[in-house]
Amino acid sequence: KAIYKVLKKSFKNGHMKMYKTFDTYLRKDDLDKKMLEVAKILSGRIEKRADYLAQKLKEMLAYETS
């Protein structure tokens, strides 16, 4: 459970940094449509990165347990 808590805290900190950045720029009225495009691109990249990290974690754990 300690490992899970460390990873959860890391993800939470990373997400909070992204949300703060989005919040800063969303307050500007002229950037709404541009921010939506950026959010779509960023969400795709985040999903791909999460898949990559999950795969690497699985490989590391498989190596450590063998």
Image (cartoon, rainbow, N blue to C red):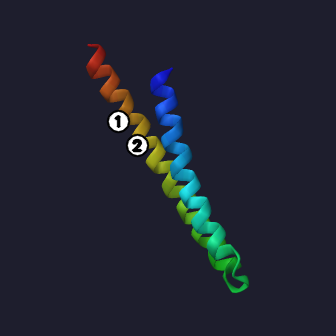
Q: CA distance from mark 1 to mark 2?
A: 6 Å
What residue is pinned by disc 2? Answer: 52
Q: Residue at x 66, y 68 (%)?
A: 23
Q: Position of residue 32 (x, y in %)?
A: 70, 78
Total label count?
2
Q: Residue furthest bottom?
A: 30
* Quadrant for the C terminus in the image: top left
Q: Residue at x 31, y 28 (%)?
A: 60
Kind of residue indicated by mark 2: Tyr
Front residue of 22 and 32: 22
Kind of residue indicated by mark 1: Lys
SS under mark 1: helix
Front residue of 20 and 49: 20
Is residue 58 depicted above or below 34 in this figure? above
Near mark 2 (Cα within 10 A), the count class, few <14, some 14-19 or many ≥20, is few
Q: Position of residue 21 (x, y in %)?
A: 57, 67
Labels 1 and 2 touching (C-beta < 8 A):
yes
What residue is pinned by disc 1? Answer: 56
Q: Residue at x 44, y 49 (%)?
A: 49
Q: Position of residue 40 (x, y in %)?
A: 60, 64
